[in-house]
Image (tube, rainbow, N blue to C red):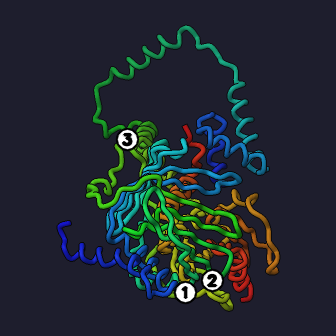
Amino acid sequence: MHHRVERQLSAYLDRELTPDEEEAVRRHLEECAPCREELARLQHLQSVLAGLPARPLPETFWPDLRRELHRRAAPAPVPWFSAWRTRPAMALAAAAVVVLLLLVPLIRGQIDRLRAAEFGLDLFVREHAITAAADPLVDSAYLGLLVTDANLRIVGARREAVER
Amino acid sequence: MRRPALAAALAVLLALPAAALGQGVSAPHRATAILHSVLVAPALIDYEGTKIISTRRGDRVETVTVLEAHKRPNRTRLEFLSPDSLVGRLVVDNGVEAWHYEPSLHTAFQGPTLTRPGRAADQLRGLLAAYGVALMGTEEVIGRPTFVLALDAKTGGSRRLMWIDQATGVPLRVEERRGGETIYATYFTRISFSLNLPEALFRFRAPAGARIFSLFASEEEGMTLEQVQRAVGFRVRTPAALPPGIRFDRANVVRYGPVAAADLRYTDGAAPISVFQVPARRVAGQEWAPAGEIVTSIGVSVRVIELGYFRVLTWEESGLRLTVVGAQPRRVLLALAAQFFRR
């Protein structure tokens, strides 16, 4: 729970969690001093960023920028791959953006898997419930209920959270 | 019925309990014959019905309504109708794997089947070893005549009552009681038999865009202790002795991501007991910490968590987190746990 909440603190601060996840984080925070400290640190950072003064742009900023862009666009086109030689930093940055765009779904999927990969007691209960299916007299619908509730808890959700 | 051999087998097997109730058959034999009819029914009978499950959830009793369909020999479909938090939950078990779809999360979970085909004769032997079986009489349930069977655990503390449809062997009502308290009760409010349920009903198709979690945590079953130790990479603890009525069943590995746990399985003849062992640092179990109660009667602090049908005993020892899960009485599970301390 602790590691899961640690990862969720930023989203908690930005109110991006589901109500149930938010409640779970809130409950955890009541008991976990390190997480409270981490949250305080994030809140401080957020407030520092929010507190930075908004500085007005000079009136000439946009015309100057357009003029500069036109000037840079004027030279004869060079092959795209020559950017590696002429503007290595920009080319690397562009490559990094492309790689990031490609990786986002993978990273997101990895996060989902990570959330599911916490080795908690819920997993033990689920595995035991599956084993208990070998008991020929246990009610299959009841067992199905136990296993599916455990599935939810393993991915960090609870049945109450999905109540409509 | 298009299969005459199957029809004949069905007729004979379903006639067993009725015949067993006739004159000249002793009461224990009648009860055993009826229990046998329950064990063979899934392979012979299709049905579809509305079932009510009543069970403890936390500190309250919860009532769940589910549409249950069964197609022989081992396919099951469960559609949950109530309460609101369960509406739309779907379980499709084709006998090989089980799918669980949770509509509000738009997520499907793929996992092992919850049906375990076994030989009825073996299952009957196990049940008779674990339970005292008695025929309590006959009653009507939803307008159908039933036999009422009582199964009392020989380890003590729990009793199963089953109202078994005389014509089919399908339990129409089941109650599990422990210490006078009902742990769970299920009963059909309506049921239809001998339907030709379509195959498609037991095939799961994930809705478009649904996230899928594949949760096959248990590895190949029936490993030796040495194989399990090699797989998990730590010394697996074993009990010094086993409490009366409990025997070792099999060893297994539960793997989740990079973490592997040893799973030693014991049985009282009918219901399993699992003993999981994993390096303590790999368990994210803090959320359980406030749950349950601490018991020290066996010399070490064990947290005991009651989960309705199951109870969980968990403790840390020499860098390992040991967790016992079972439906047996607390004293039976504690007696088994105590044996793990003595090494």
Q: Is residue B167 above or below residue A11?
A: below
Q: Quadrant of residue A67?
A: top left
x, y (%) of residue B228? 52, 82
Which mark is first along the chain, 1 or 2? 1
In the picture, the disc for residue A85 is 3
Mark pair 1, 3: CA separation: 80 Å
Going 58% across and 71% down the picture, which residue do you hit? B160
Q: Are marks 1 and 3 in contact (CB under 8 Å)?
A: no
Left or right, residue B3 beside residue B164? left
Q: Quadrant of residue B136?
A: bottom right
Q: Which quarter of the image is occupied by the C terminus of chain B?
A: bottom right
Q: Is residue B31 visible?
A: yes
Residue indicated by mark 1: B129
x, y (%) of residue B85? 55, 44
- Dot 1 crowding, Cα within 10 Å, few <14, some 14–19, many 20+: some
Give B22 or A85, whichever is nearer the viewer. Answer: B22
Please state which of the two labelled residues, at mark 1 or mark 3, is closer to the viewer: 1
Going 55% across and 72% down the picture, which residue do you hit? B260
Residue indicated by mark 2: B154
- Chain of the residue displaying label 2: B
Q: Residue lying farthest top?
A: A59
In the picture, the disc for residue B323 is none
- Chain of the residue displaying label 1: B
Give B94 or A152, whichever is nearer the viewer. Answer: B94
The three-letter amino acid code for the residue at tag 2 is: Lys
x, y (%) of residue B89? 46, 48
Left or right, residue B83 beside residue B328? left
Marks 3/2 same chain: no
The three-letter amino acid code for the residue at tag 1 is: Ala
Give B51 or A68, whichever is nearer the viewer. Answer: B51
Secondary structure beneath label 1: helix
